[in-house]
Image (cartoon, helix red, strand yellow):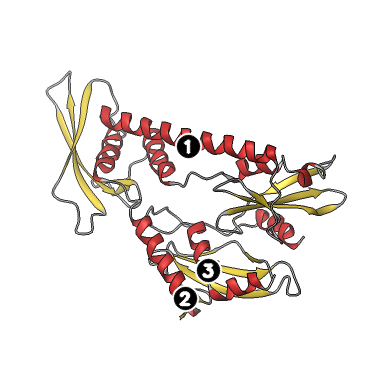
């Protein structure tokens, strides 16, 4: 019951997010997977304390702090510990931000962190994607969006030492007048944004935003969303049996690195404890969040397979759209 009460309260008061995304930082769920492997958390799980992560507190863009509490057993509701994850390095420390100095990870956790950080670093835009984004941004410059000119971009100099920014010269050639104008643009590959170096302001437009959104989506894991996970949960007998008038299935909030927690809440009865389920976002498998017992049904498995197939098909279609857009430029 405590898990769903926490879920409902946190949906009303979520922690603020970072001011801007950086593609090569660990995601919240990747950070959670490191916390879940801390020896103290593994031990709590074995002792039947059902450790659950609270929503993260952001310390700038590169640090996340998680509180972990037991949600069942004799210690239900008690704080197991606070942990801070450095999203750049994967280091995990005991405590909150500047007070967190003692390492909390064992060798297994450190090895996982190294692997996840290496994978995150591969998410920065490629040079080809950077040039594609620069051209879309050039077309969005004031006065550059007309049909009476051609717009092109060319790399200016070499990428920076770390390969995280690229400079481009953008050129607009009028087809109706003997006029040519130029601009210098800088693309930040880890942030998927473009700065107009003449004004110092990032270039924004619907088309630039749409292209960036596609780049980001292609880097997301092909998992179920929380909304898609509810479609799986609705087919589970223990959920369907409790959905009466005035009752809704509630989901949302990242309490586990790979799962979506949800349950039924009724206006007149409150939380229906026996309706709680945990849906694996990678596979669609459904389990009891307290015991880990499988709650799958033939229908839930069918719906999960169907949704995951759609996600894969959408990913392939997105890749085609990006390839076509950048090739056409």
According to the picture, the residue beneath numbered tag 2 turns out to be: 106
Mark 3 secondary-structure assignment: loop
Mark 1 secondary-structure assignment: helix
Image marks 2 and 3: residues in contact by CB distance under 8 Å: yes
Is 293 located above or below residue 245 in the figure?
A: below
273 or 64, which lies in front?
273
Image marks 3 and 1: residues in contact by CB distance under 8 Å: no
Mark earlier in primary sequence (3, 1):
3
Which quadrant of the view contains residue 70? bottom right
Can residue 214 be seen in the rendering of this structure? yes
Which quadrant of the view contains residue 255? bottom right
For image coordinates 66% across by 58% down, the residue present is: 10
In percent of width and height, residue 62 lies at: 42, 64
Q: How many angstroms separate mark 2 from mark 3 (CA)?
A: 8 Å
Q: How many angstroms separate mark 3 from mark 1 (CA)?
A: 29 Å
According to the picture, the residue beneath numbered tag 3 turns out to be: 37
According to the picture, the residue beneath numbered tag 1 turns out to be: 312
For image coordinates 70% across by 52% down, the residue present is: 277
Q: How many angstroms separate mark 2 from mark 1 (CA)?
A: 35 Å
């Amino acid at each position: 019951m405590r898990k769903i009460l926490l879920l409902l309260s946190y949906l009303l008061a979520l922690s603020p997010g970072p001011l801007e995304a950086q593609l090569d930082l660990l995601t919240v769920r990747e950070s959670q997977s490191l916390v879940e492997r801390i020896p103290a958390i593994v031990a709590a799980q074995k002792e039947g304390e059902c450790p659950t992560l609270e929503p993260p507190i952001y310390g700038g863009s590169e640090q996340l702090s998680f509180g972990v509490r037991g949600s069942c057993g004799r210690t239900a509701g008690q704080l197991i510990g606070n942990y801070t994850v450095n999203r750049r390095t994967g280091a995990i420390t005991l405590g909150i931000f500047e007070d967190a100095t003692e390492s909390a990870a064992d060798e297994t956790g450190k090895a996982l962190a190294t692997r996840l950080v290496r994978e995150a670093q591969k998410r920065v835009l490629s040079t080809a994607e950077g040039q594609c984004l620069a051209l879309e941004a050039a077309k969005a410059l004031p006065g550059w969006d007309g049909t009476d000119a051609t717009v092109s971009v060319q790399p200016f100099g070499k990428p920076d030492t770390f390969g995280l920014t690229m400079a481009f010269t953008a050129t607009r050639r009028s087809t109706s007048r003997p006029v040519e104008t130029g601009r210098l643009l800088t693309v930040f590959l880890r942030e998927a944004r473009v700065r107009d170096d003449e004004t110092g302001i990032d270039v924004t437009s619907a088309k630039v935003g749409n292209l960036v959104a596609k780049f980001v989506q292609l880097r997301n894991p092909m998992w179920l969303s929380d909304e898609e996970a509810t479609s799986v949960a609705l087919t589970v007998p223990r959920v369907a049996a409790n959905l009466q008038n005035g009752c809704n299935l509630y989901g949302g909030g990242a309490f586990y690195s790979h799962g979506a927690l949800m349950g039924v809440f009724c206006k007149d009865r409150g939380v229906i404890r026996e309706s709680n389920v945990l849906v694996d976002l990678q596979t669609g498998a459904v389990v009891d969040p307290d015991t880990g017992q499988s709650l799958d049904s033939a229908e839930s498995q069918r719906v999960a397979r169907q949704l995951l197939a759609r996600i894969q098909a959408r990913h392939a279609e997105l890749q085609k759209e990006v390839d076509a857009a950048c090739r056409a430029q």
